[in-house]
Image (cartoon, helix red, strand yellow):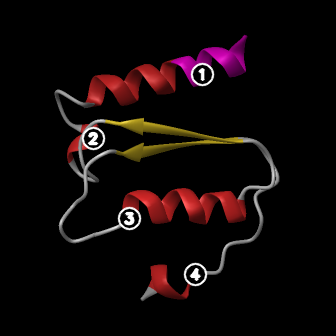
Protein backbone atom coordinates (compact mmCIF):
# COMPACT_ATOMS: atom_id res chain seq x y z
CA UNK A 1 0.00 0.00 0.00
CA UNK A 2 2.82 2.40 0.81
CA UNK A 3 4.35 2.11 -2.66
CA UNK A 4 0.98 2.51 -4.40
CA UNK A 5 0.04 5.60 -2.39
CA UNK A 6 3.44 7.37 -2.59
CA UNK A 7 3.52 10.60 -4.63
CA UNK A 8 7.06 11.62 -5.50
CA UNK A 9 8.18 15.23 -5.63
CA UNK A 10 10.28 16.22 -8.66
CA UNK A 11 13.97 15.33 -8.27
CA UNK A 12 15.97 18.31 -9.46
CA UNK A 13 19.37 16.63 -9.88
CA UNK A 14 20.96 14.32 -12.39
CA UNK A 15 20.39 10.60 -11.79
CA UNK A 16 21.36 7.18 -13.07
CA UNK A 17 18.69 4.50 -13.09
CA UNK A 18 20.09 0.98 -13.10
CA UNK A 19 17.39 -1.25 -14.61
CA UNK A 20 17.29 -5.03 -14.79
CA UNK A 21 17.02 -6.60 -18.24
CA UNK A 22 14.94 -9.56 -17.10
CA UNK A 23 11.42 -9.54 -15.79
CA UNK A 24 10.57 -10.82 -12.33
CA UNK A 25 7.33 -12.78 -12.60
CA UNK A 26 5.78 -10.89 -9.71
CA UNK A 27 6.60 -7.50 -11.30
CA UNK A 28 5.61 -7.80 -15.00
CA UNK A 29 6.47 -4.71 -17.04
CA UNK A 30 8.44 -3.12 -14.22
CA UNK A 31 11.57 -2.73 -16.39
CA UNK A 32 9.92 -0.23 -18.74
CA UNK A 33 7.60 1.33 -16.17
CA UNK A 34 10.49 2.38 -13.94
CA UNK A 35 12.24 4.18 -16.79
CA UNK A 36 9.07 6.08 -17.67
CA UNK A 37 8.42 6.86 -14.00
CA UNK A 38 11.89 8.32 -13.40
CA UNK A 39 11.78 10.30 -16.65
CA UNK A 40 8.69 12.03 -15.28
CA UNK A 41 10.18 12.58 -11.80
CA UNK A 42 13.76 13.56 -12.66
CA UNK A 43 14.04 17.12 -13.96
CA UNK A 44 17.83 16.84 -14.46
CA UNK A 45 19.73 14.52 -16.77
CA UNK A 46 18.55 10.92 -16.44
CA UNK A 47 20.87 8.17 -17.59
CA UNK A 48 19.26 4.74 -18.05
CA UNK A 49 21.58 1.75 -17.72
CA UNK A 50 20.38 -1.81 -18.21
CA UNK A 51 22.10 -4.66 -16.36
CA UNK A 52 21.69 -8.44 -16.68
CA UNK A 53 19.33 -10.30 -14.39
CA UNK A 54 15.86 -9.65 -13.04
CA UNK A 55 14.75 -7.50 -10.09
CA UNK A 56 16.26 -9.96 -7.63
CA UNK A 57 19.20 -11.52 -9.45
CA UNK A 58 20.75 -8.32 -10.84
CA UNK A 59 22.47 -7.78 -7.47
CA UNK A 60 23.64 -11.40 -7.05
CA UNK A 61 26.51 -13.24 -8.70
CA UNK A 62 27.22 -13.39 -11.55
CA UNK A 63 25.32 -10.18 -12.36
CA UNK A 64 26.40 -8.19 -9.29
CA UNK A 65 29.73 -7.39 -10.94
CA UNK A 66 27.95 -5.27 -13.58
CA UNK A 67 26.15 -3.24 -10.93
CA UNK A 68 29.34 -2.87 -8.86
CA UNK A 69 31.23 -1.57 -11.91
CA UNK A 70 28.53 1.00 -12.63
CA UNK A 71 28.49 2.21 -9.03
CA UNK A 72 32.29 2.43 -9.01
CA UNK A 73 32.27 4.48 -12.21
CA UNK A 74 29.60 6.81 -10.78
CA UNK A 75 31.58 7.22 -7.54
CA UNK A 76 34.78 8.00 -9.41
CA UNK A 77 32.92 10.55 -11.53
CA UNK A 78 31.63 12.31 -8.43
CA UNK A 79 34.97 12.13 -6.61
CA UNK A 80 36.92 13.22 -9.70
Question: Where is residue 27 drawn, in percent x and y?
Answer: 28, 69
Q: CA distance from mark 3 to mark 1?
A: 26 Å
Q: CA distance from mark 4 to mark 1?
A: 29 Å
36, above or below 48, in the image:
below
Residue identifier under label 3: 30
Residue identifier under label 2: 58
Q: Nearer the viewer, residue 71 or 30?
A: 30
Counting other residues with Cα less than 10 Å from the Cα at mark 3, is it few (<14), some (14-19), or many (20 or more)? Answer: some
Give the secondary structure at mark 2.
helix
When asked about the image quadrant of residue 47, the answer is top right
Residue 76 located within the stretch drawn in magenta: yes
Residue 46's disc is none
Question: Where is residue 49 drawn, in percent x and y?
Answer: 49, 36
Whichever of callouts 2 and 1 sits on the residue coming sooner in the sequence is 2
User: Given this view, does label 4 or label 2 mark the residue nearer the observer?
Assistant: 2
Counting other residues with Cα less than 10 Å from the Cα at mark 2, is it few (<14), some (14-19), or many (20 or more)? Answer: many
Residue identifier under label 4: 6
Residue identifier under label 1: 75
User: Given this view, does label 3 or label 1 mark the residue nearer the observer?
Assistant: 3
Whichever of callouts 3 and 2 sits on the residue coming sooner in the sequence is 3
Q: Is residue 79 left or right of residue 16?
A: right
Counting other residues with Cα less than 10 Å from the Cα at mark 1, is it few (<14), some (14-19), or many (20 or more)? Answer: few
User: Which region of the structure is painted magenta?
Assistant: 73-80
Question: Where is residue 52 drawn, in percent x and y?
Answer: 28, 36
Tag 2 near tag 1, CB within 8 Å: no
Counting other residues with Cα less than 10 Å from the Cα at mark 4, is it few (<14), some (14-19), or many (20 or more)? Answer: few
Amino acid sequence: MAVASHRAAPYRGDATLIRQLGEAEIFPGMHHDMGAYWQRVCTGRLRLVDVPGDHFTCVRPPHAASVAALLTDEYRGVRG
